[in-house]
Image (cartoon, rainbow, N blue to C red):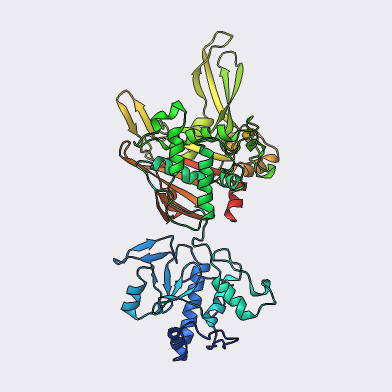
Amino acid sequence: MTSGGSDTPGPPTSLKIKPSQNGVPQFGCVHLQRHLTEDVTSGEKHLRMYTECLRCIADGDPALPQTSQTSKGLPLVTLTPNYLCIQCNTTTSEKCCKRHSDQNSHLFFVESRTGAVFCQSCHDFVWDPTLEELRIQKFGAGTNKGTQKRKHDELSTEQPQEETNMILASTIETSCRVSGIRGIYNMGSTCYINVILQCIVNNPLLRNWYLGCNHQSSDCTIKACMSCSIDIMFQEFYSQDSTSGFCAAQVLACFWLSKRKAYEELASNNEQDAHEFLTFLAEELHEINSGARQSNYELPASKKSKTAGNSGCKCIIHQTFYGKSQSVITCQKCHRSKKSVQAFMDLSLAIDDLPKYKNSGKPSTLQSRLEEEFKMPEVCEYHCECGSNKARKVTTIKNLPNVLCIQFKRFKQTVNGAFKLSTKVLFPLKIEMLHFTNYCKIKDVRKSSLARECTYELQSVVEHVGELKKGHYISYSRVGKQWFKFNDHKVTLATKSEVLSAEAYILFYVIQSLASDDNTL
């Protein structure tokens, strides 16, 4: 348990036990009293180890205090609280506390969320004035990595110090440091639904819209309303003090009761396409939320992508996902051009035709796929007025969305049947999209500014693992600066390298101004 932090109080140079005042016990329990007072050296070491535990919890890598060891010595990362032994450098799970105590005669542990002290002999948390003062100094310093509490002088000065300490000690914090982190139960081959719902829940625009009461399920009169189900899901994720799995039964029921004939085959107990469900969900929410009451909501101008245009609909789905592409067809004979503009909700990129990388042995990249799609001219048939049918088509992005959704076409249908492409495609944590827009030819001073405004940060990744008919969907989402892996109801911490090595099927990138705001939560 090692980490740094200048705002963490150092252990006292000599052991100082706080005196008893106004009837407040001088020690948390008789076991702690014996440990602190029978030997000065042991007591000083105890305070020093407790201070080190506080550093580990609040200043270090958030995964460190959440990582314990199994009985076989393997690392185990959990979202539920762990316990850091004050008498050694061991981190255990709640179930393993007693075993560690019995094997090593260690009695005192620090809870990895709040820094509270647990006594194994008492089988309870204990409030000790001396240790509590160290804890209050640490968590009252306002560090953004630990559990934050207000400083002593920010509280009412009319209360005695002892009462203030007791109030702070009795304050119940949210059990999970990061709000909204929950798994979703698989209800029979519904992993393709779960991954999309996780990406929706962790989308900052949709989160703010639903938590801002822009669609209140209590006021809605639509039967089997999908938007009501999504609203309830957001409330469950962000207002309930729970880290257990979520049952998306209402979403599934609304899905099955939907009258959208194009998606009837999706409503079954068989493995389905996550991208098709995303398209269905977007169309359903657009239709429901494009009414007069909901359409009054609009993103602040400072938060919009500067290349975003007016799609004609102000529903939250269009404001979040929709952009516009522009195709220019030029006759090879008379050089006349024809422009056409088309709205898009996502960019679908082929990965089975890689002329530059097929024989090179190098993996393809998202950048190369975008260049193939939006920079290289495409030969096409076009009946021009001059009589020629030879033309070239160049497609660029006219208006960028606030959330850029990119799909890799991994599932291919041929006369011989369907199969999955497992082609490796590298993708970045941050991507600048100005190069693929109509503005890429600008040479004035605005170009550098536009480049910053067209920069996106990776928010979520949907991965399909396994074969076409025997596969499984998992997803990754970023909450603040920490990545999480969602495998149905199981949630674990993930590293950036783990995310970037995923066999991505769908990528969600958020415009940088919105992503930066989300990092401050």
Inspect this view and state whether residue 448 appears: yes
In the image, residue 250 lies at what x, y percent? 46, 42
In the image, residue 12 lies at what x, y percent? 55, 84
In the image, residue 231 lies at what x, y percent? 54, 44
Q: In which quadrant is the C terminus drawn?
A: bottom right
In the image, residue 515 lies at what x, y percent? 58, 49
Q: Give the residue displayed 42% in from the left and 67% down from the top.
A: 82
Instruction: Name above or below for residue 338 compared with residue 165.
Output: above
Q: Give the residue displayed 48% in from the left and 39% down from the top.
A: 366
Q: Nearest the camera: 132 or 61?
A: 132
Name the side, left or right, on which 286 lies relative to 53.
right
Name the side, left or right, on which 97 lies relative to 288.
left
Q: Give the residue displayed 51% in from the left and 78% down from the top.
A: 127
Instruction: Name above or below for residue 378 compared with residue 34.
Output: above
Q: Nearest the camera: 328 or 25?
A: 25
Q: Nearest the camera: 222 or 418?
A: 222
Q: Nearest the camera: 57 or 264?
A: 264
